[in-house]
Amino acid sequence: MTLNRRSHLALMAGIAAGALALSACSAGSLGSSSSSGSAGSVTITMLVDNGDATVKTANGIAEAYNATNSGVTLKIETRAQGTDGDNAVKTKLATGDMSDLFAYNSGSLMQALDPGKNLVPLTSEPYMGNVSASFKTAVTSGSEQYGVPLGQATGGGILYNKKVFAQLGLSVPKTWADFMANNAKIKAAGIDPVIQTYGDTWTSQLFVLADYYNVQASQSDWATQYTANKAKYVDQPAIKGFQRLEDVFKAGYLNKDFASAKNAQGLQALVKGTGAQYPMLTFTVSAYVSMSATAKDDIGFFAQPGDDASKNGLTAWTPGGIYIPTTTKGAKLDAAKKFLAWFATPAGCDAQTKAVTPTGPYMIKGCTLPSSLPVAVTDMQKYFDAGNVAPALEFVSAIKGPNLEKITVEVGSGITSAADGAKRYDEDVKKQAQQLGLPGW
């Protein structure tokens, strides 16, 4: 359920391209406003990564804000992506050289910034009432909340070919039993029920990662117990993610080339209908849409089913956030909060949508998505509208074992049993928890 940092970056690479995963730091400045602003106004700077989509989004935000707000002028500065930028963000915070606002990851990577020391808490700000509860969880440290979401959420679940489902008279499953029953019918029709692409090893983790909503629904304090070394993957309910992998392999529901196929091949098989379902993150929507003129409408999405239809819901990867460093003070602090009060509204979402087509739902109340978006995105939005969403474990726990993708490849290939795989991952996370100095380990 958690991602190690390397796997996290692999998974989030596509999200970064869509202005979701924001990390790292360099230099440069963009935007139309001068550094001094007009008479009587305050100019504030916001640091973002220099990815094309991120820069387009940030400039669109600045343009919209500066055109409709007086007294504060927002200027965009850029930084590098990747590890160099990640280190530079930490250096800027440590040396007091950070911009007035900055964009960065939510979840465990935000926790590594020592929020209590380096970030301004936003918990009591009225506009935080507009922020999704699941995002607040990902930017909470101690009793304080520190960020406002930038970009959109990503869902972890099952992409499926709607034409295949219609042809076979199948309904979207809400339980694992229904999912497996569908698979039997799909296989009987000569179509691969479940696409797996272990040639890109990070993709092997989805049945485990996307099952976290079901774990939380079964045991609400599981993440807290896990972080305190009081809950294990080898036990119920967490072991079920590994068992999902084992189930589909043993039943013969995978594509024949599952061991070597790559993510792009998996998406192509889904679009062509030679495979019916693909456990995947929704940041891949833009990739498969480009493969076919009708893929936008042919491919739907549903959350990974659990054991109880009444508790069906989605595991989501939250977007990055905008934060205020503690070095922002006085008039600039007031101006930064004024900007966030505007940004945490549909106006802020609309500015982002105008700049870059969204690939997931916003985590601000009242924000809407264009009607022309791919079906998978609107399918995902329904879970958010219903409030049936939980952040992925990596956004509520700092523990990330480095070898999950290797273990899930082995379980998903029948090399290792679900029980042995879960046991090995428990040992894997133990090493990292000890490195982090967490109590109880």
Image (tube, rainbow, N blue to C red):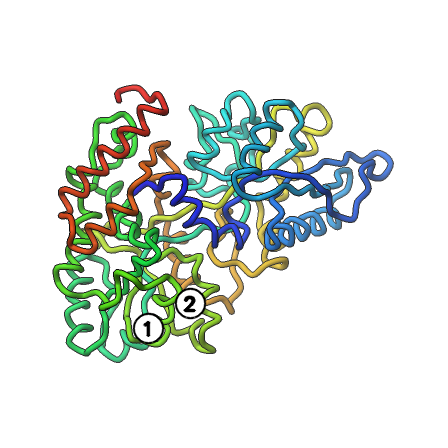
Number of other residues with Cα within 10 Å of mark 2, as a class: few under 14, some 14 to 19, many 20 or more: some
* Contact (Cβ within 8 Å) of mark 1 with mark 2: yes
Q: Vertically, is 95 above or below 423?
A: above
Is residue 377 something one can see in this rendering?
yes
The three-letter amino acid code for the residue at tag 2 is Val
**Mark number displayed over residue 162:** 1
The kind of residue tagged 1 is Lys
Q: Position of residue 397 (x, y in %)?
A: 35, 33
Q: Is residue 340 above or below residue 281?
A: above
On the image, numbered disc 2 is attached to which residue? 375
Instruction: Answer with mark 1 or mark 2, whichever residue precedes in sequence.
Output: 1
Seen as rendered, the residue at the extreme right is 39
Residue drawn 24% across the image and 69% down it: 171
In terms of depth relative to the viewer, which is nearer, 126 or 301?
301
Q: CA distance from mark 1 to mark 2?
A: 10 Å
The residue shown at (49%, 66%) is 373
Q: Is residue 236 above or below residue 200?
A: above
Within 10 Å of disc 1 (Cα), the crowding (few <14, some 14-19, many 20+) is many
| Horizontal relation, residue 2 to residue 320: left or right | left
SS label for mark 2: helix
Query: Which residue occupies the foreground of this view, 18 or 44?
Result: 18
Quadrant of the snapshot with the C terminus: top left
Looking at the picture, how far across and down is residue 349, in whole percent? 58, 52
**Could one spot residue 148 in this view of the protein?**
no
Q: Residue at x 49, y 30 (%)?
A: 145
**Relative to 322, is 283 on the left or the right?**
left
Tell me how many marks there are: 2
Residue at image position (15%, 76%) is: 188
Q: Position of residue 345 (x, y in %)?
A: 58, 46
The one nearer the camera, 74 or 439, is 439
Quadrant in the rendering for residue 29: top right
